Image: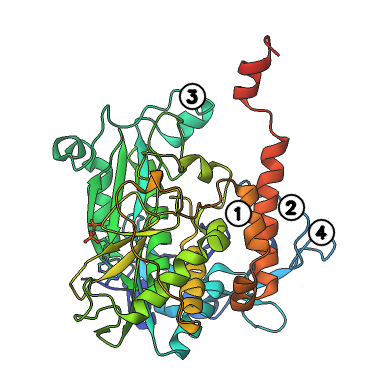
Amino acid sequence: MPGTLSFDDLKSRVSDGSIDTVLVCLVDMQGRLMGKRFHAANFIEISYDETHCCNYLLATDLEMATPDGYASTSWQSGYGDYVMKPDRETIRPVPWLEGTAMVLCDVLDHHTHDPVPHAPRAVLKKQIARLEALGFTAMMATELEFFLFERSFDALRKDGYRNLDPISGYNEDYHILQTTKEEVVMRPLRNHLYAAGLPVENTKGEAEAGQEELNIRYAPALDCADHHTIAKHAVKEIAWQAGHAATFLPKWSADRVGSSSHVHQSLWKDKIALFQDSEDPLGMSDLMKHYMAGLIAYAPEYMVFLAPYVNSYKRFAKGTFAPTKTVWSVDNRTAGFRLCGVGTKGVRVECRIGGSDLNPYLAQAGMLAAGIKGIEDKMELAPATKGDVYEDADAQEIPRTLRAATETLQGSAMLRAAMGDDVIDHYTRAAEWEQEEYDRAVTDWEIARGFERA
Ligand code: ADP
């Protein structure tokens, strides 16, 4: 499989003329690529070492507004610069854009050159380092679900996002005939991502009209998050190139199934699968049980990282495959956590709570922090639940609103100890702002319901 490019590979591609543009990108709080397009000659001569960006990039909302209340930056402090430090391990071609390569950056303080703690890559790296200090490596896979639409982003925006017609007319779960009709987007997506060094496994139709799933082979946690981010970006760009639109909004219609991002996780040491124990009836090691106990117990505390917006919470409904309870089950899709790969080296836990809008760095960091706590405290895993978990009255509920999840994040002693007060305060503020903006909005629903009848 063609992998990432070394810096020397990049230099030769620039000198043979096959690459003329380098995208130098950081990952923002929303999990988006932000940065600059460099002329490749400038990048390989000068900017490979560092470039700069306004520090508001880690303190804006989706619409690039500049909320107050962040300690890291403000109008008061003059919105100075961050250093964008290219991580040269991540240089790769971007085959769906002509003559283009990409590099991901770490974000550093402009004066001290220390990592900025709330930058999503830094948040995840910190938890990976804690896990490595215990002697473990986390292997992760995030599934990407999204919808494709008949019309383009521009056409839909100009129409006020009305008449959102999905690219297909019926539920296309595992459907080969219908997904053949979508190969104009999905085939280049698979092939371009693969050529960019992402180990694409497959795409499939999902359980709603126009809904797709992209699976990428599991990888060390940081690579997994990088893959997710690049793949999500590629979905939108390749759909746009084909005259279509793609959305990762978890719930774009009240009447349709939502989109999720399930996260598969396992711990390894070198090539040894540490979650496996062939003596155990389900093949689960004690390490796995402790990790899962932490993962489940602390789910309400890292919920904001799985569901960061008001819309994220509209997905959670009984009988939709979007779980509402923080319990685990064996190969049962109604529980928040599903045991997969029973009896194999690939035994793993899948968290099914996260929406398609999660930031994969923050979501994985939250889950690793919880799992590490479970291991450190040797937490006991309760027995698996059975049957329809939606009806299990004893099971712990996930926070059902952004407001509730923000409170559990803010009050989480576990996450404060694992990530730092500055990081938790930063993301608490981001979540509060989303709620404040929503509370200010007057929606179509309110007008239609009350205009005449109130
Ligand atoms: P499903 O039954 O959900 O379709 P798959 O076999 O397609 O399951 O696996 C789902 C995801 O789990 C894939 O992206 C795969 O790479 C990942 N996966 C497989 N083994 C492991 C593991 N040991 N740790 C983490 N992720 C894994």
Whole-angstrom CA distance, mark 1 to mark 2, is: 20 Å
Amino acid carrying label 1: it is Ala
Q: Which mark is residue 162?
A: 3
The residue tagged 4 is: 75
- Based on the displayed image, in which of its 4 quarters is residue 163 positioned? top left
**Relative to 281, 29 lies left or right:** right
CB at disc 3 and ligand 1 closer than 8 Å: no
Amino acid carrying label 2: it is Pro
Sooner in the amino-acid sequence: mark 2 or mark 3: 2
Q: Nearer the viewer, mark 1 or mark 2?
A: 1
Whole-angstrom CA distance, mark 4 to mark 1, is: 28 Å
The residue tagged 2 is: 67
CB at disc 2 and ligand 1 closer than 8 Å: no
Sooner in the amino-acid sequence: mark 2 or mark 4: 2
Picture coordinates of residue 239 (x, y %)?
35, 43
For the residue carrying disc 2, how many other residues have a C-alpha within 10 Å: few (<14), some (14-19), or many (20+)? some
Q: Is residue 28 visible?
A: no
Whole-angstrom CA distance, mark 2 to mark 4, is: 10 Å
Q: Which mark is residue 405?
A: 1
Picture coordinates of residue 203 (x, y %)?
24, 51
- Based on the displayed image, in which of its 4 quarters is residue 304 positioned? bottom right
Whole-angstrom CA distance, mark 2 to mark 3, is: 29 Å
Amino acid carrying label 4: it is Trp
For the residue carrying disc 1, how many other residues have a C-alpha within 10 Å: few (<14), some (14-19), or many (20+)? many
Q: Is residue 290 above or below residue 17?
A: below
Q: Quadrant of ligand 1?
A: bottom left
Q: Quadrant of the C terminus?
A: top right
- Based on the displayed image, in which of its 4 quarters is residue 46 positioned? bottom right
Q: Quadrant of the N terminus?
A: bottom left
Residue depicted at x 25% and y 57%: 331
